[in-house]
Amino acid sequence: MKAVVYTRYGSPDVLRLQEVAKPTPQDNEVLIRVVATSVTVGDCRMRSFTVPRAQWLFARLYLGILKPRRAILGMELSGEIEAVGKAVTRFKPGDTVFASTFAVNFGGYAEYKCMPESGLLAFKPANLTYAEAAVSVGGGMTVLRCLKRGHIERGQKVLIYGASGSVGTAAVQLAKHHFGAHVTGVCSTANLELVKSLGADQVMDYTREDFTRSGECYDVVFDAVGKLPASRAKQALRKTGHYLNVHLDSDAGGSLRVEELNALKELIEAGKIRPVIDRCYPLEQIVEAHRYVDAGHKKGNVAITVAQHNTAGGRS
């Protein structure tokens, strides 16, 4: 099968499309024919090994000291089940699914991926394309977990800092349409209309306005990009308010539960959230996709098309 492999850390040019062995499912596993995956900031950080200094040692041990321990990146995917192990009861060949590969050594940048039946794997939302389903996983579950920690009540005021990224666009929609909050989105000039279209009641251009000087107090301030110091966020918080940070309040991906993925699926199918795709590249252009994400200007998500799909399996 074809897969994108990297054997050293560095720029997007370290990624190589090559032939590797097709995996065979164990008794408790399913074999997924990957239709779509994504390029996340996390993928780019692992590829380049650009991690915060405080996490350097842990990252080296986890990712690989001298070279990557896991040769195939890709933290989320969607596709069709091609085969199942003899102990599998939850899925059957032909089922359409979406999944997080965080806890199973990644691997979305390949034509096939084996996953345990009990993993972060669920039936694909019927109202999403494969590309939309793939990019919805990480950001959607992260936002659900973070915002729940804010104990948001209907009508409360929520500010989302970094509202135009993959996490931010999901946060605006869930805060507004699921939690019923009054949402203020903070982003750059170029993304104001996008954030407003997602349901934000108010949008602020951080290059022209400082939300801490607006005189407004919020019940929740959610930093969706991990760049807002707590001390600054708290200047605009009510005394009983909650400061949330995507890097501090989402927990490790391995601790996520399939129940959370199913909850995200229900919200998607109820129309409470729909992932935003900025660009979609074929797998053969993975280097260009990583370069685009590295530039730091993406709106929402960047999707990767890995394979064609059967029209009976859902929307394209």
Image (tube, helix red, strand yellow):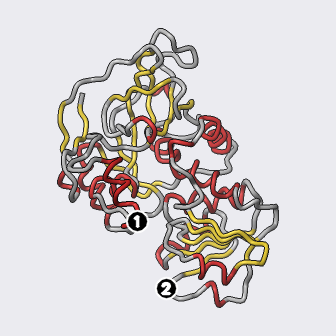
Instruction: Give the residue at x 61% y 62%.
Output: 198
Relative to 218, is 301 on the left or the right?
A: left
Q: Which residue is mark 2?
A: 207
Q: Which residue is mark 1?
A: 54
> From what the image shows, is residue 49 above or below residue 99?
below
Q: Secondary structure at mark 2?
A: loop
> From what the image shows, is residue 187 above or below residue 288?
below
For residue 269, which quarter of the picture?
A: top right
Which of discs 2 and 1 lies nearer the camera? The answer is 1
Residue 215 position in % (x across, y down)? 72, 89
Instruction: Give the residue at x 25% y 50%.
Output: 65
> From what the image shows, is residue 96 above or below residue 276?
above
Relative to 182, is 34 on the left or the right?
A: left
Q: Secondary structure at mark 1?
A: helix
Residue 158 position in % (x across, y down)? 70, 69
> From what the image shows, is residue 184 above or below residue 289?
below
Please tell me which residue lies in front, 199 or 244.
244
Instruction: Give the residue at x 73% y 53%.
Output: 178
The quarter of the picture where the N terminus appears is top left
**Kind of residue at disc 2:** Thr
Q: Say how many tags the image has.
A: 2
**Kind of residue at disc 1:** Ala
Going from N to C along the chain, the mark reached first, 2 or 1, is: 1
The quarter of the picture where the C terminus appears is top left
Residue 98 position in % (x across, y down)? 50, 35
Structural distance between the alpha carbons of marks 2 and 1:
29 Å
Relative to 48, is 169 on the left or the right?
A: right
